[in-house]
Amino acid sequence: MATTTATITLASSDIADNAMSISNTATLYTAGTDTGIVETTGLSRKKFATASEFILLDHGLANSQMADVTADKSCKVYIKNINDRGDGTKYVAVLINSIEIGRLYGGDWMFFPWAGGNDKDIDIDPLDATETTLEYCVFYE
Amino acid sequence: MATTTATITLSSSDLLTDNLSLSSTMSLYKHGTTATGLEQLNYHRAVIPTGTNFTLIQESAALNANPANYVYIVNKNTDVTDYVIVSIRTEVIGRLYAGDWMWIPYSDATTATAGVDDPSGNDSDIEIQAFTHDCTVEYALFHSGETLLTASDS
């Protein structure tokens, strides 16, 4: 098995009366065990310039890595919009099965568990055709 | 405005043939601004009983009006078999097992006609359900405005 950790640190000196610092480290295990996840897509990069929604992670692609992701398994997804923030209006929406989760503006990242399954692809819906680059990585069993 | 950052560090010495070491820091800004930070925060700690799917974060028109919101959830249980399922609207995002955390942007892209208490039930609430045992979660919403409920006795 492998040992892979994901640490988040949320920090602010002025969002509240006192400074805030929240930090947690998760070790990436297979579902319901303390056995480390040993499969990953590695870090990938996707560049696009389209205003149309497209599939970033395709569960329905037979025999693909993402076809292994199902609700009873453990999977974590990291996605980052590496564009510059610009004027703060440009983003890509991230969707699962056409349900919008949220919007990644330039410089934003997200890390979340993914249940996968039929029709549960992770899609990207850009605001417009601005050239955008995403980096992403999936850890799965 | 406030200055708040979120940093992720992914690391492993043995998942790949070479070390994995990735780090990224983002600042939490309002939609449509170049550097105006989100200034409002809700932080909670709650025990989620098994058997029921609960609304964890309530959608509201104010959240949707500024779609640059961010959500953090961590499952503080220690038994590795304990997990919560996190959903948005009708869609399961995934399972957070004991010790797992997640960080997502939250646009609250409401498509239904919903009041402040969401009578339609067809919304973008973030929902949570615990399995195996009750789960203690901590969760935060960073935002720049939410719909406040008028007191019923006002």
Image: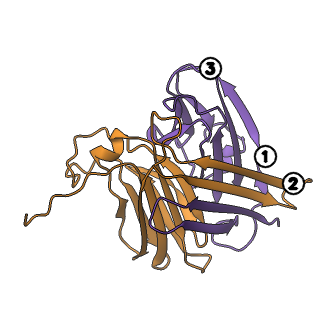
Q: Residue at x 30, y 45 (%)?
A: B62
Q: Residue at x 60, y 54 (%)?
A: B6
Give the SS element for disc 3. Answer: loop
Q: Is residue A125 above or below residue B44?
A: above
Determine which residue is flagged by label 3: A49
| Coordinates of residue A82 in the picture (x, y in percent) | 67, 36
Residues at marks 2 and 1 touching, judged by CB atoms closer than 8 Å = yes
Which one is in front, A119 or A43? Answer: A43
Specify the quadrant that holds the C terminus of chain B: bottom left
Chain of the residue where label 3 is placed in the rendered structure? A
Q: Disc 3 residue type?
A: Ala
| Coordinates of residue B114 in the picture (x, y in percent) | 22, 45
Q: Disc 2 residue type?
A: Leu
Give the SS element for disc 1. Answer: loop
| Coordinates of residue B60 in the picture (x, y in percent) | 29, 49
Q: Is residue A95 visible?
A: no
Label 2: how many Cα within 10 Å (few below 14, some 14–19, many 20+)? few
Label 3: how many Cα within 10 Å (few below 14, some 14–19, many 20+)? few
| Image depth: mark 3 or mark 2 in front | 3
| Coordinates of residue B33 in the picture (x, y in percent) | 48, 35
Label 1: how many Cα within 10 Å (few below 14, some 14–19, many 20+)? few
Q: Disc 1 residue type?
A: Gly
Q: Earlier in the sequence, mark 3 or mark 1?
A: 1
Q: Which chain is orange?
A: B
Which label is found at residue B16? 2
Which label is found at residue A42? 1
